[in-house]
Image (spheres, rainbow, N blue to C red):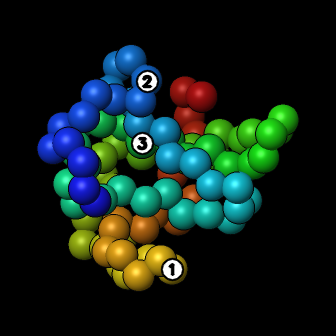
Amino acid sequence: EGGLANPPADVEGDIEVRFSEYPNAHLMIYKSNNPQRTYFLVTGRFPKYNVMGYIWGEKGMVDKYWKRTARGTMAYWIPQEALRTDHM
């Protein structure tokens, strides 16, 4: 959760990319992250990656997703079923 208060987005246009090698991964957003950005979940391993979906920060940063993660940190832990897949 450390780092810059408002670092530049991963991709131009205020897009953040979260990655996991696990196909059933959740997308994690931290309380310190910018709710005005769009967060994408990408899974896989080189050379094959899958874009699983996206969520707007303000839609993902809600109490029902606030959980202790497998690593023991607190984050908005968003299941893939809650991610949007339109416009991809």
* Residue identified by numbered label 1: 70
Which element type, helix, strand or loop, lies under badge 3? strand
Kind of residue at disc 3: Tyr
Q: Which residue is mark 2?
A: 11
Q: What is the crowding at mark 1: few (fewer than 14 residues within 10 Å), some, or many (at least 20)?
A: few
Q: Residue at x 25, y 56 (%)?
A: 2
Residue 14 % position (x, y): 32, 27
Label 3 or label 1, whichever lies nearer to me, is 1
Image quadrant in which the C terminus is located: top right
Q: Give the spatial CA distance, label 2 vs label 1.
A: 27 Å
Q: Quadrant of the N terminus?
A: bottom left
In this rendering, position of residue 64 left or right of residue 79 = left
Q: Is residue 45 visible?
A: yes
Going by the picture, which residue comes out furthest to the right? 47
Give the secondary structure at mark 2. loop
Label disc, if present, on residue 43 of the rendered structure: none
Q: Callout 1, which amino acid?
A: Ala
For marks 3 and 1 on the same chain, the one whose residue lies earlier in the sequence: 3
Q: CA distance from mark 3 to mark 1?
A: 20 Å
Q: Residue 39: which disc? A: 3
Query: Whole-percent x and y of residue 78?
Result: 45, 63
Mark 2 or mark 1, earlier in chain: 2
Horizontal side of residue 52 vs 63, given as left or right: right
Of the residues under marks 2 and 3, which one precedes in the sequence? 2
- The residue positioned 22% from the left and 60% from the top of the image is 31
Q: Nearer the viewer, residue 83 or 17?
A: 17
Give neighbour class at mark 3: few <14, some 14-19, many 20+ (Cα, 10 Å): many
Instruction: Report, in whole angstroms, how far the alpha carbon at label 2 lies from the one at label 3.
Output: 10 Å
Q: Is residue 17 above or below residue 43?
A: above
